[in-house]
Amino acid sequence: MTEPHIPLPPPPEEVRHVACVGAGVIGGGWVAHFLARGYSVTAWDPAPDAEEKLRRLVDAAWPALTQLGLAEGASTERLTVASTLEEAVAGAQFVQESAPEKLELKRELLARIDAAAPAEAVIASSTSGYPMTDMQTRAANPGRLLVGHPFNPPYLIPLVEVVGGERTDRAAVEWASRFYEAAGKSVITMDRELPGFIANRLQEALWREALHMVNNGEATVRDIDASITEGPGLRWAFMGPCLTFALAGGEGGMGHMLDHFGPSLKSPWTRLEAPELDSALRTAMVEGCDEAADGRTIAQLVAERDQGVIDVLRATGRLSGAGSVAARERSGDA
């Protein structure tokens, strides 16, 4: 990343107006999150029914956000849906782009956002895998472009991974990390680009092994999901896999664990190469998920998931940031 050459943005805690470009599941989730934290949000999406779907998503998320704790003055009425991208970003202090995962589209869109947004606005992409180095190639001011990778749904899952590209100013990365923290997110600031970032790479390893087991008839979708929700997932909600494994070493910690279990790493337990996603495997996965849903609709499953995440966050004491001082200070900006 380059030395700072971007105009000085406002202090992250003073941001009042956010723009969200792309209003699908991820972009709409960002809109809901920012509204709940007391920001004014302007959104844009090219789909003809985008506004209707976006407002429906925000309304569906609002009960969960209310349980989490809204910032004073937080309101769905602070949402404006613009008719053009340029109108959406014109007055923004921060821009979150959440377009589909198509590299050429990302390049074009980020260049348009860069051309239209105020010079001091930092611009982040929600990409789940592309490095910013590959996306910032057409922007006139690439120093302010970076990745702010969320997890679905962004209005509930705290994590956001922040990393810049080769032409991103380090000052922009540091500013964005502080902004996301002020907005109530849990931030990992990465020192270097990594395809898929951190969490997605870990998820991908588990996902590929799950596909192999279904493909080979070794386990059902229900078995695989239960093995996580009734097993290590309960620990991972508050303690990651590395520290969890360290506890397996008893008082000797990770050192004893590695000495004791290290040789098993050479056992051919896992198959990290992805299996061929043919029609048979696809059918097995789809039918397995239908069986696991047991008659529940997608809406019912979403509500169940949202409540489950809230319960876990509450049980593990991670709701303290909902009424932060920064959020309360923004409440005066109606």
Image: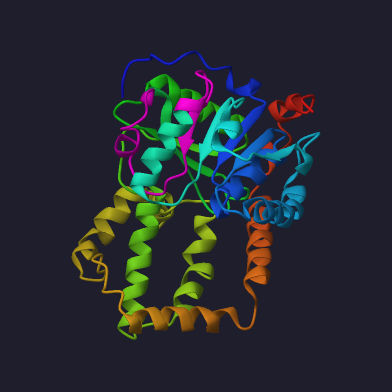
At a point 69% along the width and 60% down the height, the residue shown is: 307
Q: Position of residue 324 (x, y in %)?
A: 71, 31
**Residue 128 falls inside the magenta stretch:** yes
- Residue 302 in view: yes
Q: Residue 73, relative to residue 242: is it above or below?
A: above
Q: Residue 313, relative to residue 280: is it above or below?
A: above
- Residue 318 in view: no
Front one among 211 and 261: 211
Number of marks in the rendered image: 0
Q: Quadrant of the N terminus?
A: top left
Q: Which residues are magenta?
A: 115-142
Front one among 118 and 87: 87
At a point 65% along the width and 78% down the height, the residue shown is: 296
Q: Position of residue 304 (x, y in %)?
A: 67, 66
Please identify the quarter of the rendering in which residue 86 is found.
top right
Front one among 238 and 20: 20
Q: Position of residue 52 (x, y in %)?
A: 69, 55
Please identify the quarter of the rendering in which residue 104 is found.
top left
Please identify the quarter of the rendering in which residue 19 is found.
top right
Whether residue 27 sits left or right of residue 74 in the image: it is left
| Magenta-drawn stretch, dominant element (helix, strand or loop) | loop
Whether residue 84 sits left or right of residue 285 in the image: it is right
**Residue 111 falls inside the magenta stretch:** no
Q: Quadrant of the C terminus?
A: top right
At a point 50% along the width and 51% down the height, the residue shown is: 239
Q: Residue 246, relative to residue 21: is it above or below?
A: below
Q: Position of residue 35 (x, y in %)?
A: 70, 40
Whether residue 88 sits left or right of residue 168 in the image: it is right
Applied colour scheme? rainbow
